[in-house]
Amino acid sequence: MGDRHILAGRLDRAERSSSLSLWAAARDAGVPLHIVDDGELALCAAPALPGPIFNLGLGIANLPSLVGRAIDHFRRHATVGWVWADAPPWPGAVASAAAVYAGGPAHEVDPSGRAGDGIIVRELGRKEHGAWADVIVRAADLPGPVGDAWRLLEPRLALAPHDHRFVAEVDGLVVGTGALHTHHAVGWLRAGTVLREYRGRGIQGALIAARVRRARELGCELVGASANQGGSSARNVRRAGMEEVAVRHRYRVDGTERSA
């Protein structure tokens, strides 16, 4: 249990770093975000961008006493936000979703996943952008302003030294995406998605495998990801050989109501 606690802490910090990088790319592209980074707590509020990607509090799982700062941040900017925690952060709090942090030393992860015939998975060059964000927006059916934010941030994220974007292609058409963020020898996997009409062909598993291999090449000794419990992403990371090391819950904070 002690080892799992240490692993979970490293994965939490990698996720925090990954989110800060994503938010910074959006902010630098002119997307209106309100970001707090004090070295432990990371907060982002974006009233014009509904949803948890840009309205999120991280670091509270390890520092639950700081949940008040997250609530104040969402109230100050009059937005609905979410905080990740491993226990209810205030009386009566109810989780809107649960996530599993899955990870382990990279040498224990099976990176042999392969997609079907005719499918190519590759890392994008720093100057390649457009299709990656477009697939994320289409696969998740993101609303207008949120989709616009993803498209605006991608060219800047493409230049971030610790961020690596991957695509899966069929006949030259991008149909799946993934991202890898490295932080202190930890590889954090995120932004994995496949267009609905191409699911069930092993593409997600191949995207995971490609990112694990790249994380190894970059010297990562640990890889991790988060996935909704019982969902297809959780099954995919388990098939890749990752293990559940901690459970986090996402709690909704309505910063538009003073009683939140």
Image (cartoon, rainbow, N blue to C red):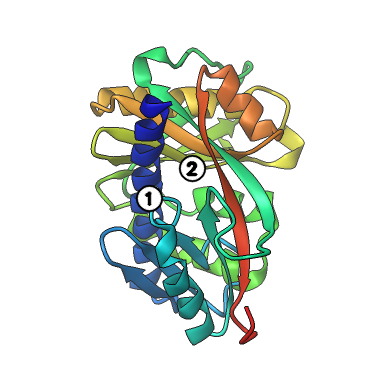
* Quarter-of-image position of residue 176: top right
Residue at figure coordinates x 51%, y 74% from the top left? 71
Q: Is residue 97 left or right of residue 112?
A: right
As drawn, which residue projects farthest toward the right? 197
Please tell me whether residue 34 is drawn above or below residue 186 in the rendered image. Answer: below
Label 1 SS: helix
> What label does residue 18 carry, if any?
1
How many numbered discs, if any?
2
Name which residue type carries label 2.
Answer: Arg
Please tell me whether residue 68 is drawn above or below residue 211 in the rendered image. Answer: below
Q: Percent x, y for residue 48?
A: 57, 79
Label 2 SS: strand
As rendered, which of 185 and 260 lies closer to the eye? 260
- Are discs 1 and 2 less than 8 Å apart at CB? yes
Residue at figure coordinates x 60%, y 42% from the top left? 99
Name which residue type carries label 1.
Answer: Ser
Quarter containing the N terminus: top left
Mark 1 surroundings within 10 Å by alpha-carbon count, few (fewer than 14), some (14 through 19), many (20 or more):
many
Q: Is residue 243 left or right of residue 236?
A: left
Quarter containing the C terminus: bottom right
As rendered, which of 214 and 120 lies closer to the eye? 214
Task: Point out the tag, 1 or 2, that comes first from the N-terminus.
Answer: 1
Residue 151 in view here: no
* Quarter-of-image position of residue 117: top right
Q: Percent x, y for residue 64?
A: 44, 58
Q: Is residue 20 left or right of residue 135?
A: left
Please tell me whether residue 53 is drawn above or below residue 30 in the rendered image. Answer: above
> What label does residue 100 carry, if any?
none
Q: CA distance from mark 1 to mark 2?
A: 9 Å
Q: Residue beneath label 2, please?
A: 190
